[in-house]
Image (tube, rainbow, N blue to C red):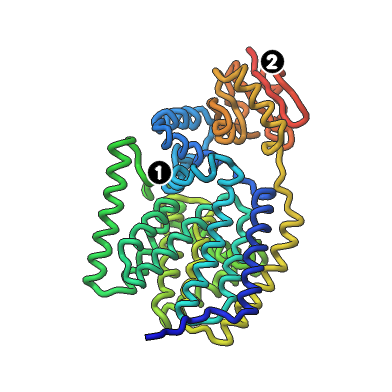
């Protein structure tokens, strides 16, 4: 029997899409490397990965505990280590990137590209000739990539979508593997488990939940027994009853709800505008409407609400970083269903609007900083050679700890009064984290260049 292969798109569209994806890969890789500030979070992920590969996890944790203990007025929610999903991926792919930061940075642009290609696979499976979804998957998140704290949400989104796809394809074991990976990269991804409940019968639910639970339990036990750590990181969660009673006041809840709506709106239009609150409200109402029309969309609504509740009561942080998967999961839902003319018009307008936002943003935003300079490398080498026995006060301590084997702790303009005699401070002159130190009897200048000063407080 001869079967005709289903063609995804006509030749002209295939040509256009191929050229776009190739240009995208080159373009995003360039500006991702040139403009994105990866801050200290990624330094810790890389340190965890290296410690995991060298079986020196305990040594790293001791250093992080010292660093956090020395940091005056440090954020009580700052963990000494993050979930181990991304560090494990870094270890498994180390034969490719060789711990080169440039190649490590390419992982997220590649993740976005893979998501776009996977949407093509889904559309092809459904004999759908719409190419707007993979285009939008490439363009829309680029506006968010300027924020260093969003990167893991993009990588976890890839594994969430893969888990949904293979679950729908009745390949439970693969779906479990991808979903567990997503949760170990971003722990709030667990709230997407509702998708599996909505799309299977009761007995199938039991089977999948059993496999999922067994996988989590096995990984948790392995890391606990071998390394003595939690696979999910050691985030310090302050119970509700220990927090300020303002949590239960209407004003506090109202302000947090408005911020939630603003951040939801920012997922669509990159920056906060006067209408962001109303946009977020419209999106929220629209999700409720879609949830009644097609139950799949309740997955997104449930994820957003559960994330908001946990963020509000247990672990306050910038909620936009953990809402990002909504973008990709929404596109996944659209690609699964029949796409009408109204959806096409909406997607087209969306693409054009985001292109108008994207290119000026890249031109205007300057992510260059002194930490990326040769000057920082030079002064860091001096610190390592001459002062490595001292803990170094710096506004980006984890970056210093990643690049060189020293103990560093966080300092800023507000906590200079807490420094003790003989404390050594690395001042970034461009960051303005070194205010007047006249409150101390003597301050010795150890090293200096155009970007940095290395100071020591005397008696």
Quarter residue 272 falls in: bottom right
> How many numbered dots are placed on residues in this image?
2
Q: Is residue 345 above or below residue 191?
A: below
Residue at 60%, 22% (x, y): give it.
384
- Identity of the residue drawn at 42% across and 77% down: 291
Please provide percent x and percent y for residue 320. Answer: 54, 58
| Image quarter (top left, top right, bottom left or bottom right) of the N terminus | bottom left
In the shown orientation, is residue 166 left or right of residue 430?
left
Distance, label 2 to label 1, CA atoms, is: 41 Å
What residue is disc 1 on? 233
Q: Is residue 131 left or right of residue 171?
A: right
Q: Is residue 53 above or below residue 144?
A: above
Provide the residue designation for mark 2.
442
Q: Residue furthest front?
A: 1
Q: Is residue 327 visible?
A: no
Tell me the quarter of the image containing the C terminus.
Answer: top right
Q: Residue at x 55, y 61 (%)?
A: 112
- Whether residue 354 is situated above or below residue 233 in the rendered picture: below
Task: Identify the residue at horizontal 33%, vertical 68% (top origin).
Answer: 196
Residue that lies at the very extreme toward the top in this rendered image:
459
* Label 2 CA crowd tier, 10 Å (few <14, some 14–19, many 20+): few
Q: Position of residue 64 (x, y in %)?
A: 47, 32
- Give the camera-side residue of 223 and 410: 223
Q: Position of residue 421 (x, y in %)?
A: 59, 16
Near mark 1 (Cα within 10 A), the count class, few <14, some 14-19 or many ≥20, is some
């Amino acid at each position: 029997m001869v079967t005709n292969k289903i063609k995804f798109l006509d030749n002209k569209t295939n040509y256009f899409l191929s050229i776009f994806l190739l240009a995208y890969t080159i373009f995003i890789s360039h500006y991702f490397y040139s403009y994105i500030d990866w801050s200290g979070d990624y330094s810790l992920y890389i340190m965890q990965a290296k410690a995991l590969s060298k079986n020196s996890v305990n040594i790293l944790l001791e250093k992080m505990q010292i660093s956090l203990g020395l940091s005056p007025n440090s954020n009580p929610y700052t963990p000494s280590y993050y979930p181990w999903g991304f560090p494990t991926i870094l270890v498994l792919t180390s034969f490719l990137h060789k711990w080169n930061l440039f190649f490590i940075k390419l992982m997220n642009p590649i993740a976005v590209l893979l998501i776009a290609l996977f949407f093509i696979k889904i559309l092809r499976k459904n004999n759908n000739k719409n190419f707007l979804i993979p285009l939008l998957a490439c363009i829309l998140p680029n506006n968010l990539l300027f924020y260093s704290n969003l990167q893991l949400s993009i990588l976890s989104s890839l594994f969430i979508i893969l888990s949904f796809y293979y679950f729908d394809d009745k390949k439970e074991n693969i779906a479990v593997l991808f979903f567990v990976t997503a949760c170990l990269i971003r722990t709030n991804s667990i709230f997407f488990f509702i998708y599996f409940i909505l799309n299977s019968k009761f007995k199938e639910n039991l089977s999948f939940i059993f496999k999922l639970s067994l996988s989590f339990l096995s990984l948790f036990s392995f890391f606990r027994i071998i390394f003595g750590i939690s696979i999910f990181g050691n985030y310090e969660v302050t119970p509700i009853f220990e927090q300020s009673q303002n949590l239960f006041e209407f004003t506090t809840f109202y302000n947090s709800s408005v911020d939630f709506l603003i951040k939801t709106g920012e997922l669509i239009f990159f920056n906060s505008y006067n209408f962001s609150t109303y946009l977020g409200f419209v999106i929220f109402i629209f999700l409720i409407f879609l949830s009644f029309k097609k139950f799949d969309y309740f997955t997104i609504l449930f994820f957003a609400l559960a994330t908001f509740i946990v963020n509000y009561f247990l672990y306050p942080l910038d909620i936009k970083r953990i809402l990002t998967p909504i973008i990709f999961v929404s596109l996944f839902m659209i690609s699964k269903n029949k796409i009408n003319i109204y959806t096409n018009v909406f997607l087209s307008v969306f693409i054009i609007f985001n292109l108008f936002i994207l290119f000026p943003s890249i031109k205007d935003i300057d992510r260059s900083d002194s930490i990326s300079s040769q000057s920082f490398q030079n002064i860091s080498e001096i610190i390592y050679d001459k002062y490595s026995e001292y803990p170094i006060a710096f506004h980006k301590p984890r970056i210093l700890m990643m690049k060189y084997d020293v103990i560093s702790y966080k300092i800023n303009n507000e906590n200079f009064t807490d420094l003790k005699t003989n404390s050594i401070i690395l001042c970034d002159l461009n960051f303005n984290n070194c205010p007047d130190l006249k409150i101390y009897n003597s301050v010795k200048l150890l090293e200096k260049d155009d970007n940095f000063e290395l100071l020591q407080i005397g008696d």
